[in-house]
């Protein structure tokens, strides 16, 4: 089906797009109580597109301008993509494909190296060149068993934050303490505004605690109790930790001790921790914690392979030539020589071949070339080349963003 794709500018169009996305998601109610002008604080100007059929808005997608950290610490231009939805009566007619195509060309025209998103289903985005570049884990801790090993530091002092200060203080703490871990993303102002709207329009209690001295805080956590109907007498009082931003050891220990030590609370459920989080090593009884799920976190699309591969650091002094295939963005279909000193295009024969979705999976070090080859997502003339590539692409810390958008 032919659709016309255009950038949405007016307040009415942006609200219609937001509600279209919510209709497509089935489980989200329409936006309510929006103040005049508020929608433009929740969406970045110029980055929401709509698909029209016969003048009717039937699909939408948007993006936010951000930065993403690559292995070695370089931050590259990054489009954080979200709100992709097509009206149920118009699905499977190529509308999402047209939106993705338009958006990826726009991201390329803006000079951004990568796009990332969070996926509602794992079967949608590979066809557009996205691959899973980082994962996170959901962890439950039984506080009664969660004694910390003797000798573990106390960490930074922690205090509850006055709710009125939250939306000024948290963005400052995040920006001042941006981690160097690969996969880290900026948290643009429109996301803070969206989080604020969701927090303030939900009726239950929610708390924010910060670590470090006032004015030079190093981390924060946002948490709330769940299933509170029988809270007074329950023996399963549970808090959900929605955000755990602890980029230094001091912040980590302070905030972790604070959460595990909360009176009344039997269970702490961390929504998203890095897959290499040190928590099991802190506990005398490591079975006090249980990993209840591991989720794909960052779905990454390499939009400019040269920029992304050149900005990344490599961990070994081997050399390998990698041929990338990108059917949608042809200028990425290039062979690169990758060595300890960096990556550059070459005319040499490619020892390894990979689709752009496979390149996305290994870019941050969250997947291995050997693993991709087993799945048929990469292939090599000589399997030894896979080992050379894995040593080059290895990272010390698992890639992680820690934020859902
Ligand atoms: C996901 C969604 C945007 C796809 O829109 P769409 O217009 O139907 O997609 P298209 O018609 O362009 O489909 C392109 C291809 O993807 C496939 N596809 C699309 N959605 C899929 C899904 N949810 N699961 C599996 N395959 C899917 C189609 O079968 C088609 O395959 P083909 O090219 O082999 O024929 C739409 O189903 C939707 O709005 N879903 C609910 C909201 C949602 O989940 N949004 C994503 C938030 S991250």
Image (spheres, rainbow, N blue to C red):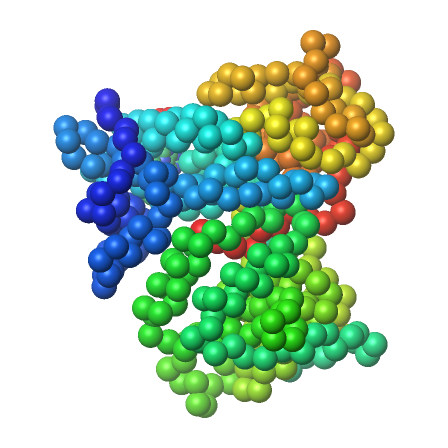
Q: Is residue 300 above or below residue 193?
A: above
Q: Is residue 308 above or below residue 157?
A: above
Residue at 57% across, 57% down: 175
Residue 119 spot, x, y in % from top left: 45, 44
Taking the image as four quarters, which one is ligand 1 found in?
top left
Q: How many marks?
A: 0
Residue in front for this viewpoint, 89 or 66: 66
* Residue 135 seen in the current view: no
* Residue 105 seen in the current view: yes
Residue 342 spot, x, y in % from top left: 75, 28
Residue at 45% across, 90% down: 233
Residue 274 spot, x, y in % from top left: 64, 55
Residue 172 spot, x, y in % from top left: 55, 62
Residue in front for this viewpoint, 278 or 221: 221
Residue at 55% across, 37% down: 77
Residue in front for this viewpoint, 346 or 388: 346
The part of the image, by quadrant, that contains residue 302 is: top right
The part of the image, by quadrant, that contains residue 177 is: bottom right
Q: Is residue 30 above or below residue 319?
A: below
Residue at 58% across, 68% down: 220
Residue in front for this viewpoint, 208 or 225: 208
Q: Is residue 317 above or below residue 253?
A: above
Residue 149 falls left or right of residue 145: right
Name the outermost residue toward the bottom: 233
Residue 360 falls left or right of residue 14: right
Instruction: Indicate the quadrant containing the N terminus: top left, top right, bottom left or bottom right.
Output: top left
């Amino acid at each position: 089906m032919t659709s016309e794709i255009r950038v949405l500018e007016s307040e009415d169009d942006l609200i219609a797009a937001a509600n279209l996305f919510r209709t497509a998601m089935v489980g989200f109610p329409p936006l309510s109580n929006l103040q005049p002008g508020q929608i433009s604080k929740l969406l970045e100007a110029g980055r929401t597109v709509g698909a029209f059929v016969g003048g009717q808005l039937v699909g939408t997608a948007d993006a936010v301008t951000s930065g993403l950290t690559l292995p070695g610490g370089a931050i590259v231009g990054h489009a954080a993509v979200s709100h992709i939805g097509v009206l149920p009566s118009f699905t499977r007619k190529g509308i999402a494909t047209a939106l993705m195509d338009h958006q990826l060309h726009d991201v390329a025209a803006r000079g951004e190296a990568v796009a990332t998103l969070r996926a509602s289903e794992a079967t949608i985005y590979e066809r557009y060149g996205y691959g899973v570049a980082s994962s996170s884990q959901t962890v439950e801790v039984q506080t009664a068993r969660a004694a910390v090993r003797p000798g573990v530091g106390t960490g930074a002092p922690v205090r509850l934050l006055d709710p009125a200060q939250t939306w000024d203080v948290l963005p400052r703490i995040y920006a001042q303490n941006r981690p160097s871990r690969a996969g880290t993303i900026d948290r643009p102002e429109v996301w803070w505004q969206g989080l604020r709207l969701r927090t303030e329009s939900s009726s239950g209690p929610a708390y924010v605690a910060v670590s470090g001295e006032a004015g030079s805080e190093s981390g924060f956590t946002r948490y709330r109790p769940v299933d509170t109907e029988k809270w007074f007498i329950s023996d399963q009082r549970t808090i959900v930790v929605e955000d755990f931003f602890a980029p230094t050891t001091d912040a980590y220990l302070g905030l972790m001790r604070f959460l595990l030590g909360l009176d009344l609370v039997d269970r702490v459920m961390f929504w998203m921790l890095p897959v290499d989080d040190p928590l099991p090593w802190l506990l005398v009884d490591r079975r006090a914690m249980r990993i209840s799920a591991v989720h794909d976190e960052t779905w990454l699309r390499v939009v400019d392979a040269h920029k992304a591969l050149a900005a990344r650091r490599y961990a070994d002094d081997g050399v390998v030539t990698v041929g990338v295939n990108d059917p949608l963005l042809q200028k990425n279909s290039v062979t690169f020589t990758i060595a300890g000193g960096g990556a550059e295009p070459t005319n040499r024969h490619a020892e390894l071949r990979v689709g752009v979705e496979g390149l996305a999976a290994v870019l941050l070090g969250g997947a291995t070339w050997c693993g991709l080859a087993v799945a048929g997502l990469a292939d090599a003339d000589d399997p030894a080349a896979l080992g050379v590539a894995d040593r080059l692409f290895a990272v010390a810390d698992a890639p992680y963003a820690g934020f859902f958008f």
